[in-house]
Image: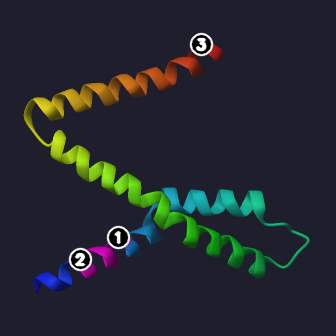
Amino acid sequence: MDAPLLPLVVFAFAALFQWINPKAWLLALSIAAAWVRPDAPAMPQLLVIGAVFFLVTPPSCIPWALLGQGSARLAGHGRGLRAFNIAMALLLVASVVPMVLEG
């Protein structure tokens, strides 16, 4: 494959993946259930919600992508990767503790 086309192909596959992404479908259903009023026409409401997502998603995803790229450089292999995985596991456990204590 021609090198200049590779980013476009990767982008296209990532965009197409969203059609089979269960998290994306759950998000769409949740947003529709919470924000679409049954007493008003659905299409204008869905267009507004879609426009908001279209405007908000890129600026909120770019920092995460940059953070992921930077962390891959720091913890891409060996001890750095092990330390990163341990830190993430500890943070996951720490995020669950308040729910367990409250329940």
User: CA gap, disc 1 to disc 3?
Assistant: 39 Å
Image quadrant holding the N terminus, namely bottom left
Q: Quadrant of residue 17?
A: bottom left
- The image shows residue 93, relative to residue 88, as above or below, that is above
Circle count? 3
Disc 3 and disc 2 in contact, CB within 8 angstroms: no
Relative side of 95 to 11, left or right: right
- The image shows residue 90, relative to residue 2, as above or below, that is above
Q: Which residue is mark 3?
A: 101
Q: Earlier in the sequence, mark 3 or mark 2?
A: 2
**Residue 1 in sight in this render:** no
- The image shows residue 73, relative to residue 55, as above or below, that is above
Image quadrant holding the C terminus, namely top right
Q: Earlier in the sequence, mark 1 or mark 2?
A: 2
> In the rendered structure, which amino acid carries the disc numbered 3?
Leu
Q: Quadrant of residue 8?
A: bottom left
Q: Which residue is mark 2?
A: 7
Where's residue 36, x and y in %? 78, 66
> In the rendered structure, which amino acid carries the disc numbered 2?
Pro
Q: Residue furthest top?
A: 101
Q: Which residues are magenta?
A: 7-14
Disc 1 and disc 3 in contact, CB within 8 angstroms: no
Q: Residue at x 16, y 35 (%)?
A: 81
Where's residue 43, x and y in %? 75, 81
Q: Main secondary structure of the magenta part?
A: helix
User: CA gap, disc 3 to disc 2?
Assistant: 46 Å
Where's residue 27, x and y in %? 59, 58
Disc 1 and disc 2 in contact, CB within 8 angstroms: no
- Residue 14 marker: 1
Relative side of 28 to 58, left or right: right
Q: Residue at x 11, y 86 (%)?
A: 2
Relative side of 17 to 8, left or right: right
